[in-house]
C-alpha cells in the first residue's frame, strides 16, 4: 500500500519538473543506446593504466597514478557529481563494461540466493573496505590500491558470471551501496514523466525489456536488471542510472527529472524492488554505517587518532594494529550509534507520544541521518580533491617521461591545489548543508509521526544531528594528513 502522503502523479497546479533529457544536446547523447559504453571505455582503459602503474610504477604514492587518481580525484569527483546530478558514476562504471563483455561468451544460469537478497552482505563489505583502508594504509600503497581494483574486477566477473541480472550491483557492491545512499539527496531521479501512460501500457517493457517480434521473442533491449518497475519506482535507492528503462520504454515516457533532494526520505511508499523503507533493517544499517563511517573515515586521518591508538595499544597490550582498529570501529559503528540513536528513540517515544515500537521508530528516523552523513563525506573527499586538484598533472608527466615520452615536459611537482585556508570554509558549508537537510527530513517525520507534539519528537533527533555536525566540524579543524600528495600539513 502506498503512503498517503506519496502521490506519483503531479498536481495540476505544480510546475512540471525539469527533465534533463528534454535538453536537445543531452537527449541526443543519452538516448543513444551506446552512450553508456562510450563513457565506460575510457574509464576501463584508465583502470588498466592505474593497475599497471600501481603494480609496476613508483612505490611513493604521490608519484603513482593508482593512488593519486583513486584517493584524491575519483572519490572527490564521485560525491560532487552525486550532489549536483545523481548516480552518474554507476552509469559510467567500467566494471559493468567488463561484465557485459564477458556475458557475450558466458551466460549466467543461477538466481541470487533468496536469503542474500538484502544489503547485509554489502554492509559487511563496506565496513571491510573501510577497515582495510586504515589497516593497510591504502592511500599510501599503490600496490595494494592496484590489487583492490583488480579484486573488484574479479568479484564482478565471478558474481555476475554465475548469477543472473545485476546481482553484484544490487546485493554486493559496497561502492554502489555508497552511491545509492548518497543519491537519496540528489536533485535528479530517473522516473516516469506521465503515470497515466504507464497505466495504459500493456507490455511493461521498462522491466521486461523490449523484444523483437517473432516466435523466439529475442530481447533487443533489456529492461531494469535491478527489478525497479518504473511506474512503482520511488527514489534513487538501487538505481544505477543505467537508463536501460529509458531505452526500453516504447512510449518515451522515462526521463531524468528534478525533485526536492532528500524528499524520498520523508515518505514511506511501497517501492518497486525495495519494499517499505520502514521494514528494511538492512537499509537502516547501511544508512547508519554510511553516516557514522563518514566520521570514522575522517577521524582516521587526523592527528588525535594516533593518540587514541597508542593509548588503546598500551591498554590492550596489543602489538598489532588490527585489534586496536577493531575497537575503534566497534565504538564508531556500533556503540556510538546504539547510544545516540537509542536515547533519541526512547526520548521520542516518551516525550513525543509516538505509538510506534522502539525498533520501528529507530528505523523510521535513522534515514534522516543520510543527508548529514553525505555532507561529511562531501567535506572529507572534497578536502582531498580541492587541495590536490592539480596533482594528476605532474604524476602524468612523470609517468610518460619514465616511458620515454617527454612531450609534456618534466613533472611540475609544485602543482597541487587550493590552499587549505580556502577549502575549510567550503567544508563548513557542505557540513551545514547536510545538517540542514537532516533537520528538514526529521521535522517532516516528526510531524507525520507525532501530529500533536511534533517538536517533542523533533528535538531528540535534532540533537543527535547537532552532535554529529559538531563532531564533523571539530574533525575538519584538526591537523589532517594530505594523503596521496607530496604536501603535508
Image (cartoon, rainbow, N blue to C red):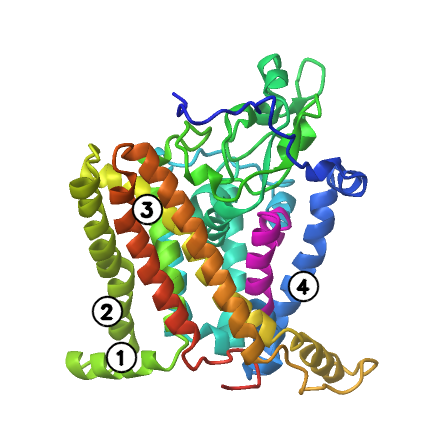
- Depth check, mark 2 against mark 3: the one in front is 3
Tell me which numbered mark, 1 or 2, is placed earlier along the sequence: 1
Specify start and end residues of the magenta stretch as a single range: 71-95
Residue hosting label 2? 327
Q: Earlier in the sequence, mark 1 or mark 4?
A: 4
Q: Position of residue 458 (x, y in %)?
A: 30, 45
**Label 1 Cα neighbours within 10 Å, binned few <14 / some 14-19 / many ≥20:** few
Residue 281 can be seen, yes or no = no
Mark 1 lies on residue: 308
Q: Earlier in the sequence, mark 4 or mark 3?
A: 4
* Percent x, y of residue 421: 55, 79
Q: Earlier in the sequence, mark 2 or mark 3?
A: 2
Magenta part mainly helix, strand or loop? helix
Q: Is residue 90 above or below residue 425?
A: above
Horizontally, residue 47 falls left or right of residue 369, namely right
Quote the CA–CA distance across marks 2 and 3: 23 Å
Amino acid at each position: 500500500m502506498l503512503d498517503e502522503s506519496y502521490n506519483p502523479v503531479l498536481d495540476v497546479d505544480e510546475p512540471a519538473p525539469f527533465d534533463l533529457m528534454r535538453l536537445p544536446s543531452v537527449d541526443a547523447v543519452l538516448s543513444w543506446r551506446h552512450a553508456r559504453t562510450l563513457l565506460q571505455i575510457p574509464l576501463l582503459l584508465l583502470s588498466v593504466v592505474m593497475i599497471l602503474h600501481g603494480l609496476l610504477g613508483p612505490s611513493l604514492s604521490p608519484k603513482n597514478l593508482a593512488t593519486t587518481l583513486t584517493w584524491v580525484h575519483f572519490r572527490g569527483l564521485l560525491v560532487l557529481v552525486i550532489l549536483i546530478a545523481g548516480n552518474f558514476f554507476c552509469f559510467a562504471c567500467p566494471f559493468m563494461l567488463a561484465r557485459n563483455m564477458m556475458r557475450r561468451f558466458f551466460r549466467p544460469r543461477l538466481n541470487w540466493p533468496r536469503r542474500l537478497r538484502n544489503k547485509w552482505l554489502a554492509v559487511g563489505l563496506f565496513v571491510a573496505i573501510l577497515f582495510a583502508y586504515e589497516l593497510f594504509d591504502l592511500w599510501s600503497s599503490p600496490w595494494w590500491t592496484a590489487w583492490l581494483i583488480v579484486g573488484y574486477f574479479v568479484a564482478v566477473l565471478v558474481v555476475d558470471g554465475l548469477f543472473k541480472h545485476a546481482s553484484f550491483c544490487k546485493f554486493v557492491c559496497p561502492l554502489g551501496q555508497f552511491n545509492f545512499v548518497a543519491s537519496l539527496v540528489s536533485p535528479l531521479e530517473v522516473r516516469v514523466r506521465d503515470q497515466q501512460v504507464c497505466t495504459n501500457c500493456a507490455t511493461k517493457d521498462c522491466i521486461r525489456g523490449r523484444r523483437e517480434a517473432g516466435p523466439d521473442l529475442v530481447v533487443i533491449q533489456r529492461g531494469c536488471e535491478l527489478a525497479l518497475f518504473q511506474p512503482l519506482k520511488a527514489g534513487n535507492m538501487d538505481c544505477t542510472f543505467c537508463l536501460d528503462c529509458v531505452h526500453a520504454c516504447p512510449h518515451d515516457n522515462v526521463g531524468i527529472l528534478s525533485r526536492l533532494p532528500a524528499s524520498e526520505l520523508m515518505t514511506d511508499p511501497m517501492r518497486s524492488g525495495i519494499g517499505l523503507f520502514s521494514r528494511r533493517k538492512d537499509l537502516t544499517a547501511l544508512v547508519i554505517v554510511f553516516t557514522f563511517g563518514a566520521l570514522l573515515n575522517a577521524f582516521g586521518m587526523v592527528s588525535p587518532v594516533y593518540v587514541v591508538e597508542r593509548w588503546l595499544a598500551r591498554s590492550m597490550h596489543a602489538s598489532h594494529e588490527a585489534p586496536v582498529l577493531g575497537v575503534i570501529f566497534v565504538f564508531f559503528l556500533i556503540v556510538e550509534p546504539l547510544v545516540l540513536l537509542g536515547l533519541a528513540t526512547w526520548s521520542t517515544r516518551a516525550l513525543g507520544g509516538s505509538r510506534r515500537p522502539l525498533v520501528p521508530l529507530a528505523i523510521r528516523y535513522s534515514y534522516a541521518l543520510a543527508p548529514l552523513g553525505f555532507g561529511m563525506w562531501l567535506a572529507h573527499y572534497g578536502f582531498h580533491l580541492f587541495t590536490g586538484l592539480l596533482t594528476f598533472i605532474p604524476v602524468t608527466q612523470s609517468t610518460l617521461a619514465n616511458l620515454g615520452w617527454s612531450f609534456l615536459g618534466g613533472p611540475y611537482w609544485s602543482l597541487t591545489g587550493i590552499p587549505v585556508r580556502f577549502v575549510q570554509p567550503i567544508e563548513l558549508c557542505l557540513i551545514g548543508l547536510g545538517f540542514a537537510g537532516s533537520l528538514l527530513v526529521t521535522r517532516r517525520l516528526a510531524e507525520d509521526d507525532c501530529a500533536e507534539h511534533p517538536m517533542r519528537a523533533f528535538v531528540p533527533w535534532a540533537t543527535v544531528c547537532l552532535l554529529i555536525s559538531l563532531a564533523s566540524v571539530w574533525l575538519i579543524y584538526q591537523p589532517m594528513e594530505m594523503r596521496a600528495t607530496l604536501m603535508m600539513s
